[in-house]
Amino acid sequence: MSDIVKNQHYIPQSVLKHFSSNEKVFEALVDKNKEPYQTHYRNSMSERFAYEHPYLARNQLEKFFQEVEADYGPAIIEALRLITLYEESGGMIDPIKKHVQAYLSAIIIYYYRSGALLHEFAHETSKKEIRVSLLLDKLVNTSYINNLGNSIKEFYEFAIIKSEQSHFLISDQYISTVALRIKSRFGNISNRHLGLKDVMILVPLSSQYYIVFYHGRKPGYIQPQTMNTLTAEQVKEINRIIINNSYKKCVGNEKSALLEALPHFEWSSPSATYIGYNSGRVSGSTLKKEIFFYERDKRAWELFTGPTHYRDYNELGRNDICGCGSGKKFKVCCYDDYEEVKRIWRTISDKHLAERVSVHPSAQVEQSIFSF
Protein backbone atom coordinates (compact mmCIF):
# COMPACT_ATOMS: atom_id res chain seq x y z
CA MET A 1 0.00 0.00 0.00
CA SER A 2 1.31 3.45 -0.88
CA ASP A 3 2.21 5.70 2.02
CA ILE A 4 1.86 8.83 -0.13
CA VAL A 5 -0.73 11.25 1.28
CA LYS A 6 -2.83 12.49 -1.63
CA ASN A 7 -5.68 14.20 0.25
CA GLN A 8 -3.84 16.98 2.10
CA HIS A 9 -5.63 19.02 4.75
CA TYR A 10 -5.28 22.74 5.16
CA ILE A 11 -7.08 22.50 8.49
CA PRO A 12 -5.57 19.76 10.71
CA GLN A 13 -7.67 16.63 11.22
CA SER A 14 -6.84 16.82 14.93
CA VAL A 15 -8.83 20.07 14.99
CA LEU A 16 -11.60 19.04 12.58
CA LYS A 17 -12.56 15.98 14.61
CA HIS A 18 -13.62 18.29 17.46
CA PHE A 19 -16.08 19.93 15.07
CA SER A 20 -17.65 16.59 14.13
CA SER A 21 -20.57 14.56 15.41
CA ASN A 22 -20.06 10.81 15.04
CA GLU A 23 -17.03 11.73 12.90
CA LYS A 24 -19.26 13.61 10.41
CA VAL A 25 -19.27 17.33 9.68
CA PHE A 26 -21.28 19.63 7.46
CA GLU A 27 -19.20 21.53 4.94
CA ALA A 28 -20.29 24.56 2.94
CA LEU A 29 -18.68 25.86 -0.24
CA VAL A 30 -19.19 29.47 0.72
CA ASP A 31 -18.28 30.88 -2.69
CA LYS A 32 -20.74 28.59 -4.52
CA ASN A 33 -23.93 29.41 -2.58
CA LYS A 34 -24.86 25.72 -2.42
CA GLU A 35 -26.54 23.61 0.25
CA PRO A 36 -24.09 22.37 2.93
CA TYR A 37 -23.28 18.68 2.56
CA GLN A 38 -22.33 16.08 5.15
CA THR A 39 -19.00 14.29 4.95
CA HIS A 40 -16.48 12.51 7.15
CA TYR A 41 -14.23 15.04 8.88
CA ARG A 42 -11.20 13.34 7.28
CA ASN A 43 -12.54 14.33 3.87
CA SER A 44 -13.27 17.95 4.74
CA MET A 45 -11.06 21.05 4.40
CA SER A 46 -8.67 19.29 2.06
CA GLU A 47 -7.32 19.27 -1.48
CA ARG A 48 -5.41 16.72 -3.53
CA PHE A 49 -1.66 17.33 -3.30
CA ALA A 50 -2.20 20.85 -1.92
CA TYR A 51 1.39 21.24 -0.65
CA GLU A 52 3.48 19.55 -3.31
CA HIS A 53 6.36 21.41 -4.99
CA PRO A 54 8.71 20.22 -7.75
CA TYR A 55 11.80 21.11 -5.67
CA LEU A 56 10.57 19.22 -2.58
CA ALA A 57 10.45 15.49 -2.02
CA ARG A 58 6.99 14.00 -2.33
CA ASN A 59 4.95 14.78 0.81
CA GLN A 60 7.87 16.64 2.42
CA LEU A 61 5.78 19.61 3.51
CA GLU A 62 2.85 17.37 4.41
CA LYS A 63 5.13 15.34 6.69
CA PHE A 64 6.29 18.53 8.40
CA PHE A 65 2.66 19.45 9.10
CA GLN A 66 2.05 15.94 10.44
CA GLU A 67 4.96 16.37 12.85
CA VAL A 68 3.50 19.64 14.13
CA GLU A 69 0.08 18.02 14.38
CA ALA A 70 1.46 15.07 16.35
CA ASP A 71 2.36 17.55 19.07
CA TYR A 72 -0.56 19.96 18.71
CA GLY A 73 -3.35 17.36 18.50
CA PRO A 74 -2.76 16.15 22.09
CA ALA A 75 -2.38 19.80 23.15
CA ILE A 76 -5.97 20.51 22.03
CA ILE A 77 -7.21 17.48 23.96
CA GLU A 78 -5.36 18.74 27.02
CA ALA A 79 -6.83 22.24 26.60
CA LEU A 80 -10.34 20.75 26.47
CA ARG A 81 -9.55 18.65 29.56
CA LEU A 82 -8.40 21.76 31.43
CA ILE A 83 -11.58 23.58 30.39
CA THR A 84 -13.73 20.71 31.70
CA LEU A 85 -11.78 20.77 34.96
CA TYR A 86 -12.23 24.54 35.18
CA GLU A 87 -15.98 24.31 34.64
CA GLU A 88 -16.47 21.43 37.06
CA SER A 89 -14.32 22.75 39.89
CA GLY A 90 -14.61 26.50 39.44
CA GLY A 91 -10.83 26.73 39.50
CA MET A 92 -8.45 29.23 37.92
CA ILE A 93 -8.33 29.97 34.20
CA ASP A 94 -4.56 30.63 34.21
CA PRO A 95 -3.58 26.97 33.56
CA ILE A 96 -5.68 27.04 30.36
CA LYS A 97 -4.21 30.38 29.33
CA LYS A 98 -0.61 29.27 29.89
CA HIS A 99 -1.22 26.01 28.07
CA VAL A 100 -2.66 27.74 24.98
CA GLN A 101 0.02 30.43 25.01
CA ALA A 102 2.71 27.73 24.95
CA TYR A 103 1.38 26.62 21.56
CA LEU A 104 1.00 30.02 19.91
CA SER A 105 3.77 29.30 17.40
CA ALA A 106 1.99 26.11 16.28
CA ILE A 107 -1.28 28.03 16.05
CA ILE A 108 0.36 30.63 13.80
CA ILE A 109 1.90 27.88 11.64
CA TYR A 110 -1.60 26.41 11.17
CA TYR A 111 -2.82 29.86 10.19
CA TYR A 112 -0.12 30.22 7.52
CA ARG A 113 -0.78 26.68 6.31
CA SER A 114 -4.49 27.36 5.80
CA GLY A 115 -6.54 27.08 2.64
CA ALA A 116 -7.50 30.75 2.88
CA LEU A 117 -3.85 31.77 2.63
CA LEU A 118 -3.32 29.50 -0.37
CA HIS A 119 -6.30 31.21 -1.99
CA GLU A 120 -4.79 34.63 -1.32
CA PHE A 121 -1.53 33.53 -2.91
CA ALA A 122 -3.53 32.33 -5.93
CA HIS A 123 -4.52 35.97 -6.42
CA GLU A 124 -0.83 36.71 -7.06
CA THR A 125 -0.04 33.72 -9.27
CA SER A 126 -1.85 30.88 -11.02
CA LYS A 127 1.18 28.61 -10.62
CA LYS A 128 0.79 26.20 -7.73
CA GLU A 129 4.53 25.83 -7.13
CA ILE A 130 4.87 29.60 -6.63
CA ARG A 131 1.97 29.59 -4.17
CA VAL A 132 3.68 26.84 -2.18
CA SER A 133 6.94 28.84 -2.30
CA LEU A 134 5.13 31.88 -0.87
CA LEU A 135 3.73 29.65 1.86
CA LEU A 136 7.21 28.33 2.64
CA ASP A 137 8.53 31.89 2.93
CA LYS A 138 6.06 32.39 5.77
CA LEU A 139 6.77 29.07 7.48
CA VAL A 140 10.58 29.32 7.49
CA ASN A 141 10.53 32.76 9.11
CA THR A 142 10.61 31.28 12.61
CA SER A 143 11.83 34.51 14.17
CA TYR A 144 8.77 36.37 12.89
CA ILE A 145 6.42 33.57 14.01
CA ASN A 146 7.94 33.46 17.51
CA ASN A 147 7.93 37.25 17.87
CA LEU A 148 4.32 37.41 16.73
CA GLY A 149 3.35 34.73 19.23
CA ASN A 150 5.13 36.62 22.01
CA SER A 151 3.36 39.85 21.05
CA ILE A 152 -0.04 38.17 21.23
CA LYS A 153 0.90 36.67 24.59
CA GLU A 154 2.10 40.00 26.00
CA PHE A 155 -0.33 42.55 24.58
CA TYR A 156 -3.63 40.75 23.92
CA GLU A 157 -6.25 39.89 26.53
CA PHE A 158 -7.31 36.26 26.92
CA ALA A 159 -10.81 34.79 27.18
CA ILE A 160 -12.79 31.66 26.34
CA ILE A 161 -16.19 31.63 24.64
CA LYS A 162 -18.64 28.74 24.78
CA SER A 163 -21.57 27.62 22.66
CA GLU A 164 -23.72 25.37 24.81
CA GLN A 165 -25.31 23.87 21.68
CA SER A 166 -21.88 23.30 20.04
CA HIS A 167 -22.81 25.55 17.13
CA PHE A 168 -19.44 27.22 16.49
CA LEU A 169 -18.14 26.99 12.93
CA ILE A 170 -14.54 26.82 11.67
CA SER A 171 -13.26 28.67 8.60
CA ASP A 172 -10.71 27.55 6.04
CA GLN A 173 -8.38 30.18 7.51
CA TYR A 174 -8.24 28.16 10.77
CA ILE A 175 -7.79 31.26 12.94
CA SER A 176 -10.51 33.86 12.40
CA THR A 177 -9.65 37.53 12.81
CA VAL A 178 -11.74 40.68 12.87
CA ALA A 179 -10.95 44.38 13.23
CA LEU A 180 -12.46 46.11 16.24
CA ARG A 181 -11.75 49.53 14.73
CA ILE A 182 -10.55 51.04 11.46
CA LYS A 183 -6.91 52.04 11.75
CA SER A 184 -5.95 53.11 8.24
CA ARG A 185 -5.54 51.96 4.66
CA PHE A 186 -2.39 49.83 4.56
CA GLY A 187 -0.30 48.64 1.65
CA ASN A 188 0.73 45.25 2.99
CA ILE A 189 -1.80 44.23 5.66
CA SER A 190 -5.49 44.48 6.46
CA ASN A 191 -7.03 46.12 9.53
CA ARG A 192 -7.52 42.63 11.03
CA HIS A 193 -3.91 41.51 10.71
CA LEU A 194 -2.35 39.48 13.54
CA GLY A 195 -0.27 41.71 15.81
CA LEU A 196 -2.25 44.91 15.29
CA LYS A 197 -4.11 46.84 17.93
CA ASP A 198 -7.92 46.76 17.91
CA VAL A 199 -8.04 43.19 16.61
CA MET A 200 -9.82 40.08 17.90
CA ILE A 201 -8.38 36.62 17.18
CA LEU A 202 -10.59 33.53 17.42
CA VAL A 203 -8.69 30.25 17.88
CA PRO A 204 -10.79 27.09 17.43
CA LEU A 205 -10.70 24.26 19.94
CA SER A 206 -14.04 22.61 19.18
CA SER A 207 -17.58 23.35 18.07
CA GLN A 208 -18.22 24.24 21.72
CA TYR A 209 -15.16 26.30 22.67
CA TYR A 210 -13.05 29.03 21.10
CA ILE A 211 -10.06 30.80 22.60
CA VAL A 212 -10.20 34.58 22.16
CA PHE A 213 -7.24 36.93 22.11
CA TYR A 214 -8.14 40.58 21.70
CA HIS A 215 -6.91 44.13 21.94
CA GLY A 216 -9.30 47.07 21.99
CA ARG A 217 -13.05 47.55 22.23
CA LYS A 218 -14.29 43.96 22.21
CA PRO A 219 -18.02 43.11 22.46
CA GLY A 220 -19.47 43.44 25.95
CA TYR A 221 -20.34 39.76 26.24
CA ILE A 222 -16.66 38.78 26.12
CA GLN A 223 -14.93 39.41 29.43
CA PRO A 224 -11.22 38.73 29.98
CA GLN A 225 -9.79 35.90 32.05
CA THR A 226 -13.02 33.93 32.22
CA MET A 227 -15.36 31.53 30.45
CA ASN A 228 -18.05 33.42 28.55
CA THR A 229 -21.13 31.34 27.75
CA LEU A 230 -22.79 33.01 24.79
CA THR A 231 -26.45 33.27 23.95
CA ALA A 232 -27.70 31.78 20.68
CA GLU A 233 -27.70 35.25 19.07
CA GLN A 234 -24.16 35.94 20.26
CA VAL A 235 -22.98 32.61 18.80
CA LYS A 236 -24.57 33.61 15.50
CA GLU A 237 -22.70 36.93 15.60
CA ILE A 238 -19.39 35.10 16.13
CA ASN A 239 -20.22 32.63 13.35
CA ARG A 240 -20.83 35.51 10.94
CA ILE A 241 -17.25 36.60 11.62
CA ILE A 242 -15.94 33.06 11.20
CA ILE A 243 -17.72 32.38 7.90
CA ASN A 244 -16.50 35.70 6.48
CA ASN A 245 -12.93 34.61 7.24
CA SER A 246 -13.51 31.79 4.75
CA TYR A 247 -12.73 32.05 1.07
CA LYS A 248 -13.95 28.65 -0.10
CA LYS A 249 -15.03 26.36 2.75
CA CYS A 250 -16.58 26.54 6.21
CA VAL A 251 -17.37 23.58 8.48
CA GLY A 252 -19.65 22.90 11.44
CA ASN A 253 -21.19 19.89 13.13
CA GLU A 254 -24.73 21.26 12.72
CA LYS A 255 -26.22 22.05 9.33
CA SER A 256 -28.52 24.64 10.88
CA ALA A 257 -25.58 26.73 12.12
CA LEU A 258 -24.13 26.88 8.60
CA LEU A 259 -27.50 27.66 7.02
CA GLU A 260 -27.97 30.57 9.44
CA ALA A 261 -24.49 31.98 8.73
CA LEU A 262 -24.37 31.56 4.95
CA PRO A 263 -26.71 34.49 4.09
CA HIS A 264 -24.31 36.78 5.96
CA PHE A 265 -21.28 35.68 3.93
CA GLU A 266 -19.98 38.52 1.78
CA TRP A 267 -17.68 37.55 -1.04
CA SER A 268 -14.63 39.72 -1.50
CA SER A 269 -11.52 38.62 -3.33
CA PRO A 270 -8.07 39.58 -2.07
CA SER A 271 -7.04 42.99 -3.37
CA ALA A 272 -3.78 44.00 -5.03
CA THR A 273 -2.45 47.19 -3.49
CA TYR A 274 0.44 49.31 -4.76
CA ILE A 275 2.25 52.14 -3.02
CA GLY A 276 4.11 54.87 -4.86
CA TYR A 277 6.98 56.68 -3.12
CA ASN A 278 8.66 60.03 -3.79
CA SER A 279 11.74 58.11 -4.92
CA GLY A 280 9.70 56.59 -7.75
CA ARG A 281 9.71 53.12 -6.19
CA VAL A 282 6.44 51.21 -6.24
CA SER A 283 5.74 48.26 -3.95
CA GLY A 284 2.80 45.88 -4.09
CA SER A 285 1.05 43.38 -1.82
CA THR A 286 -2.02 41.20 -1.78
CA LEU A 287 -4.37 42.03 1.07
CA LYS A 288 -7.00 40.01 2.88
CA LYS A 289 -10.55 41.24 2.64
CA GLU A 290 -11.43 43.66 5.41
CA ILE A 291 -13.78 42.36 8.13
CA PHE A 292 -15.07 44.67 10.86
CA PHE A 293 -16.93 43.54 13.95
CA TYR A 294 -19.02 46.68 14.31
CA GLU A 295 -21.52 47.76 11.70
CA ARG A 296 -20.55 51.43 12.05
CA ASP A 297 -16.95 50.61 11.09
CA LYS A 298 -18.17 48.59 8.12
CA ARG A 299 -20.30 51.52 6.91
CA ALA A 300 -17.43 53.97 7.32
CA TRP A 301 -15.04 51.68 5.44
CA GLU A 302 -17.46 51.28 2.55
CA LEU A 303 -17.82 55.06 2.44
CA PHE A 304 -14.05 55.54 2.59
CA THR A 305 -13.31 53.07 -0.20
CA GLY A 306 -16.22 54.19 -2.38
CA PRO A 307 -15.29 56.15 -5.51
CA THR A 308 -17.59 59.13 -4.94
CA HIS A 309 -17.52 59.98 -1.23
CA TYR A 310 -15.73 63.31 -1.68
CA ARG A 311 -18.06 64.40 -4.44
CA ASP A 312 -21.19 63.38 -2.51
CA TYR A 313 -20.24 64.46 1.02
CA ASN A 314 -17.30 66.82 1.19
CA GLU A 315 -19.23 70.01 0.56
CA LEU A 316 -22.32 69.14 2.62
CA GLY A 317 -23.45 71.10 5.66
CA ARG A 318 -25.02 69.30 8.60
CA ASN A 319 -28.55 70.33 7.57
CA ASP A 320 -28.13 69.51 3.88
CA ILE A 321 -29.75 66.44 2.37
CA CYS A 322 -27.40 63.47 2.71
CA GLY A 323 -25.46 62.43 -0.37
CA CYS A 324 -26.43 58.75 -0.03
CA GLY A 325 -29.87 59.37 -1.46
CA SER A 326 -31.85 58.58 1.68
CA GLY A 327 -33.62 61.97 1.68
CA LYS A 328 -32.57 62.53 5.32
CA LYS A 329 -30.49 65.39 6.63
CA PHE A 330 -26.77 64.74 6.61
CA LYS A 331 -26.48 65.15 10.41
CA VAL A 332 -28.89 62.28 11.12
CA CYS A 333 -27.73 60.01 8.30
CA CYS A 334 -24.11 59.55 7.17
CA TYR A 335 -22.48 62.42 9.09
CA ASP A 336 -20.83 60.26 11.78
CA ASP A 337 -19.63 57.80 9.15
CA TYR A 338 -18.07 60.61 7.13
CA GLU A 339 -16.33 62.00 10.22
CA GLU A 340 -14.73 58.57 10.60
CA VAL A 341 -13.71 58.70 6.93
CA LYS A 342 -11.93 62.01 7.52
CA ARG A 343 -10.12 60.45 10.50
CA ILE A 344 -8.90 57.61 8.28
CA TRP A 345 -7.57 60.07 5.71
CA ARG A 346 -5.69 61.91 8.47
CA THR A 347 -3.95 58.69 9.51
CA ILE A 348 -2.54 58.24 6.01
CA SER A 349 -0.24 61.22 6.54
CA ASP A 350 0.70 60.12 10.08
CA LYS A 351 4.44 59.38 10.03
CA HIS A 352 4.17 57.49 13.32
CA LEU A 353 1.19 55.36 12.33
CA ALA A 354 3.08 52.07 12.58
CA GLU A 355 3.78 52.73 16.26
CA ARG A 356 0.15 53.62 16.89
CA VAL A 357 -1.49 50.61 15.27
CA SER A 358 0.83 47.65 15.91
CA VAL A 359 1.72 45.76 19.07
CA HIS A 360 4.08 43.49 17.12
CA PRO A 361 7.71 44.69 17.15
CA SER A 362 8.52 42.90 13.86
CA ALA A 363 5.57 44.39 11.97
CA GLN A 364 6.37 46.37 8.85
CA VAL A 365 3.27 48.51 8.30
CA GLU A 366 3.06 50.40 5.01
CA GLN A 367 0.37 52.93 4.30
CA SER A 368 -1.57 52.92 1.07
CA ILE A 369 -3.43 55.66 -0.77
CA PHE A 370 -4.44 53.81 -3.94
CA SER A 371 -5.15 50.19 -4.81
CA PHE A 372 -6.10 48.03 -7.73
Image (cartoon, rainbow, N blue to C red):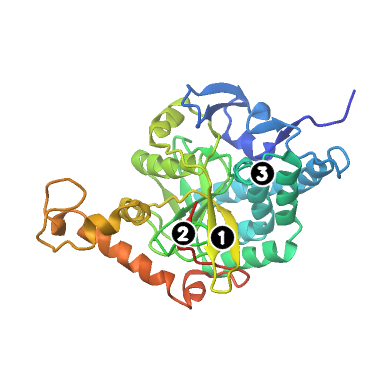
Q: Please tell me whether mark 1 sits on a helix, a strand or a loop.
A: loop
Q: Amino acid at mark 3?
A: Thr
Give the crowd class for mark 3: few <14, some 14-19, many >=20 residues within 10 Å.
few
| Residue 246 in the image, given as x and y percentages of width and height | 53, 40
Residue on which the image places disc 2? 370
Q: CA distance from mark 1 to mark 2?
A: 12 Å
Going by the numbered disc 1, the residue's amino acid type is: Asn
Q: Residue 301: image x %, image y %?
A: 36, 55
Instruction: Identify the residue at horizontal 55%, vertical 28% (top origin).
Output: 27
Q: Tag 2, which secondary structure?
A: strand
Does any portion of residue 304 appear in the rendered image? Answer: yes
Vertical placement of residue 273 versus 24, above or below? below
Q: Are marks 1 and 3 in contact (CB under 8 Å)?
A: no
Q: Residue reaching furthest left?
A: 319
Residue with the mark numbered 1: 188
* Nearer to us: label 1 or label 3: 3
Q: Name the kind of residue labelled 2 in the image.
A: Phe
Q: Residues within 10 Å of mark 1 (few under 14, many from 20)?
A: many
Relative to 25, residue 299 above or below: below
3D distance between C-alphas at marks 3 and 2:
21 Å
> Quick one: label 3 or label 2, which is nearer the N terminus?
3
Check residue 273 in the rendering and tell me which mark sits there, or answer none: none
Give the labeled residue for mark 3. Answer: 125
Q: Position of residue 119 (x, y in %)?
A: 61, 41
Q: CA distance from mark 1 to mark 3?
A: 17 Å
In the rendered image, the quadrant that contains the N terminus is: top right
